[in-house]
Amino acid sequence: MSTEISPTNFETELPASEHQIQDVQQTQCCIVGGGPAGAVLALLLARLGIPVMLLETHKDFDRDFRGDTIHPSVMEIMDELGLADSLLKLPHAKMRQLTLKTNEESVTFAEFSRLKTKYPYIMMLPQVRFLEFITAEAKRYPNFQLVLGANVQELIEEDGVIRGVRYRGHGGWHEVRAMLTVGADGRHSRIRQLTGFEAIQTSPPMDVLWFRLPRKPEDPEVGMGRIGRGHILVMLGRSDSWQIAYVIPKGGYQQIRTAGLEVLRQSIAEIAPELSDRLEHLKDWSQIAFLSVESNCLKRWYLPGLLLIGDAAHVMSPVGGVGINYAIQDAVVAANVLSKPLQAGNVQVRDLAKVQRQREIPTRIIQAFQSLVQQQILARVLNSDQLFKPPALFRIPILRDLPMRLIAFGVLPAHVKT
């Protein structure tokens, strides 16, 4: 759980800048990281008239193999903002159910049509389109500023309080001074590194290879899991392609790479024969992205003047695809809690601690659920040549509703305070 600290017992001394600063800008809230958490928080604050600057390291949002799932809880948040209908006009696909197929049987383990929501599906939308959509909406407000190509390197600390950041880009070094700095810069967070925060680690027994294969018009509109002897493959449908997750034992990537691409293609064909006629599109290892799966949660998400959210505060396993869902809910809670202190010009440590208190328990619960799935199902499949039999709960609708609701909404889902 969170621990209260105050400026007087914050002992970290950050060095003064040794760089020639080209300009100093002032804002109320500086958000580092233009992913789902940072972009949504910036929009929420901008709507309330709070000056906010969003800094993104890259020069655009177009990175491959990022999460593309928009869960029902996020769609409800978009609806609360009056943006759901516009978002649905973008080209997308919908997953209305998730099925699990073994060599012997097929089981539906999540049927989203059973959910009591206006959005009983998972929306598959390339993350670049989602981020462009959110930031375009934020640009409607004159108090919002987006800076692309801003590589944040340093925190500004004065009298034990974080007062902003220094970033490199656009031909030199720049300073952004802010009442509140938010680190939303992902699992490899620079802000997290600068704080030296300690994380509680778990050890997922797997890694993932991500790649894409063409999707045909006659292919089903569902998400599918395929389990063979010692192998797991997950298929997530985009409008024109399948995003494939080939799950491997932890540390097994080099062995697969050494065996060669043809051996990988043969393994995929054995698990999912329906993909055999399109595996020729997988021609080079450059088409395959390697994800080292990890899961952790910081013991503390804040310092005076600084808050971490999303993967910067808690790295999520890909099980259930809930990372974006939880990152955006972090942003909603942060906006709900901090908007009035920001408007009043007085953000206290207790305000930052309140954000962690509201989001830490849901995060720990979903990570425990992911760990259970990894250890009791995925690890057993990956480390065995025996035929896998789906757990009994997958066969009983009333029992499988709980995991489905965890995937769709998470624990204690957040809503926009109006």
Image: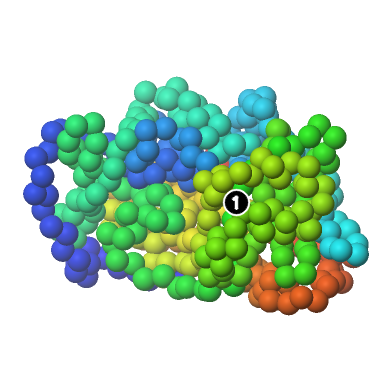
Query: Where, quadrant-wise, is the C terminus in this rendering?
Result: top right
Residue 118 rendering spot, x and y as whole percentages: 76, 39
Q: Is residue 137 visible?
A: yes
Residue under the image location 91 percent in, 64 percent down = 104
Q: Say which element carries label 1.
A: strand
Q: Is residue 367 visible?
A: no
Residue 22 rendering spot, x and y as whole percentages: 13, 33
Q: Nearer the viewer, residue 266 or 379?
A: 266
Q: Does 24 sit above or below residue 207?
A: above
Left or right relative to 401: residue 199? left
Residue 398 falls in which quadrant of the image? bottom right
Left or right relative to 15: residue 349? right
Residue 59 rendering spot, x and y as whole percentages: 37, 33
The count of marks equals 1
Residue under the image location 40 percent in, 56 percent down = 188
Residue under the image location 50 percent in, 30 percent down = 132
Left or right relative to 14: residue 285? right
Amino acid type, mark 1 = Trp
Residue under the image location 54 percent in, 49 percent down = 285
From the image, tell me which residue sits under label 1: 210
Q: Nearer the viewer, residue 92 or 112?
A: 92
Q: Does 56 sit above or below residue 158?
A: above
Disc 1 packing (10 Å; few <14; some 14–19; many ≥20): some
Residue 253 falls in which quadrant of the image? bottom right
